[in-house]
Image (cartoon, rainbow, N blue to C red):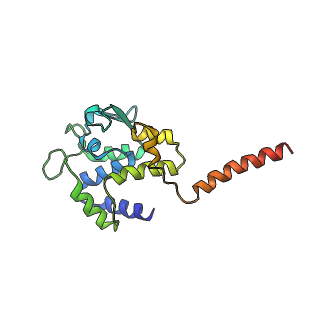
Amino acid sequence: DDELGRLLKVLEKDTNRPAANAILLLLTTGMRLTECLSAEWKNVDRTSRTLTVEAAISKTRKRRNVVLSDVALDILDKLGTEGKHERLFISSRTGKPLKSIRKAFVRIIEEAGIQGFRIHDLRHCFCSYALQQGRSLVEVSQLAGHADIQMTMRYAHLAKGQLHDASNSAGDHITAVRKANG
């Protein structure tokens, strides 16, 4: 949480807004980098709160819908490219679609004082945070667009105490039933 806080603080004030917003969208949706930078406005459906990833750019080569949270929709609202450009993320320097954010990402991560962190780790964080907040493996698997739940299980790093809480909840239920049957 400390690293996340530092990252968010740097992203909030970073002057390269297209790259910072792309990083934020990656973190809040679990999208893959190519999916994010290739995203087009025609694939954003605000009514269903989804962003369609076409099969051609999906790792699994299957079309899928990315669910857009309130935070993700807020990021899209701040881009300033809707109705002006086909793609979501446009370089403020060249006026062309962003092809890479790697240099900006490295700079931002260094400024946040985070080491050993890759762009794909943003996807990992999204999945891990969702699981830590009590979402099921099935839900997170679908949010991430994983081909099978085994892949999602690789992201299932539980926060300290979560397994104890899970164990206690099962134990509490057993104790309650035992008391009820006295």
Q: Nearer the viewer, residue 178 or 1?
A: 178
Q: Is residue 34 above or below residue 23?
A: above
Vertical position of residue 159 compared to residue 55: above or below = below
Left or right of residue 12: residue 139: right
Toward the viewer: 97 or 147?
Answer: 147
Q: Residue furthest front?
A: 150
Is residue 70 in sight in this rendering?
Answer: yes
Quadrant position of residue 32: top left
x%, y% of residue 100?
Answer: 21, 50
Residue 96: image quadrant is top left
Residue 138 point in image, percent of width and height: 50, 38
Query: Which is nearer the eye, 124 or 88?
Result: 124
- Residue at the image point whose x is 38% and y is 46% from the top: 30
Is 80 displayed left or right of 123 in the figure? left
Q: Residue at x 53, y 42 (%)?
A: 136
Asked whether residue 27 appears in the rendered view, the answer is no
Q: What's the residue at 31%, 63% (across, down)?
A: 109
In the image: residue 135, left or right of residue 55: right
Count the marks: how many? 0
